[in-house]
Amino acid sequence: MNVEEEGNEIEQLRESVSFLTNQCAQLDEANRAWQQYQAAQLENFRSKVQDYLSFDENASFDIIAQEIVEQISKEREDFNEKYEAIEKANDKLRSGTSIFIIDFFYLRFFNVASTGNFESIQESYMNTINELNEQLLVMKDRCEELAAEKQFLSIELEKRCVEIDREHSKQTIEKVPSNILRQPFKE
C-alpha cells in the first residue's frame, strides 16, 4: 500500500468517524428529548392520580400501575364483603318477615297482646324493615357506582398502557437516512 492510498483510507475513516459522531450526537439529542417527554408524561399522570393514590415521587409508571391495580382489587374485595353482608342481612330480614307474619297470626289467633300494643310492635317492625331496605338500596346504588368507576378506570388504564407502549415503540425505531443506505459498503 502506498502513501497516497493510506492517505485516502485515513481520509475516508475520518469522514466515517465524523459522520458517526454527528449521528451519535443526533441520537443523544433524540434520546434526551424522549426522556424529557417521558418525564413530562409521568409527571402529568402522577398529578392526575395523586388525589386517589399515595405513592413515592420517584415511582415509575409500572409501580403506579401496580398500585392502581392493587387499589382496585382491594376496593373490589371490600365491595364483595359489603355486598355479602347486605345479602345476609336481607336474607335475615326476609326470614324475619316470615317470622313476623307467623307471630302476627299467633298473636291474633290466641289474642295474647292487646290491640294497641300489637299495632305498635307491627309498626316498629315495618319501620325497621323500611329503613333497612332504604339503606340496602343506597348501598346497592353506591356499589353500582363503584363498579362503574372501577370499570372506567380499568379501561382508561388499559388505553394509557397501550398508548404508552405504542409511543415508546415509535420513538425507539432508529431512522437511517436513505443516502446512507445507498452508499456502497467499504472494507
Image: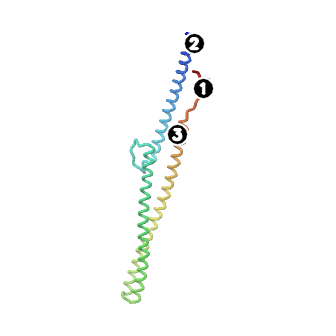
Q: In terms of sequence position, does the residue under pointer 3 or pointer 1 come before the other?
A: 3
Question: Which quarter of the picture shows residue 184?
Answer: top right
Query: Residue 53: x and y, percent?
Result: 41, 50
Q: Nearer the viewer, residue 131 or 136?
A: 136
Q: Residue at x 53, y 44 (%)?
A: 163
Q: Quick one: which residue is furthest to the bottom in this view?
A: 110
Residue bearing mark 2: 5
Amino acid type indicated by mark 3: His
Question: Which quarter of the picture shows residue 122?
Answer: bottom left
Amino acid type indicated by mark 1: Ile
Q: Nearer the viewer, residue 39 or 164?
A: 164
Q: Secondary structure at mark 1?
A: helix
Residue bearing mark 3: 168
Q: In terms of sequence position, does the residue under pointer 2 or pointer 1 come before the other?
A: 2
Query: Residue 45: x and y, percent?
Result: 47, 45
Q: Nearer the viewer, mark 3 or mark 1?
A: 1
- 169 to the left or right of 134: right
Q: Residue at x 41, y 60 (%)?
A: 78
Residue bearing mark 1: 180
Amino acid type indicated by mark 2: Glu
How far apart are the two marked residues, 3 and 2, measured between alpha carbons?
45 Å
Say whether marks 3 and 2 touch (CB < 8 Å): no
Quadrant of the drawing holding the N terminus: top right
How far apart are the two marked residues, 3 and 1, measured between alpha carbons?
25 Å
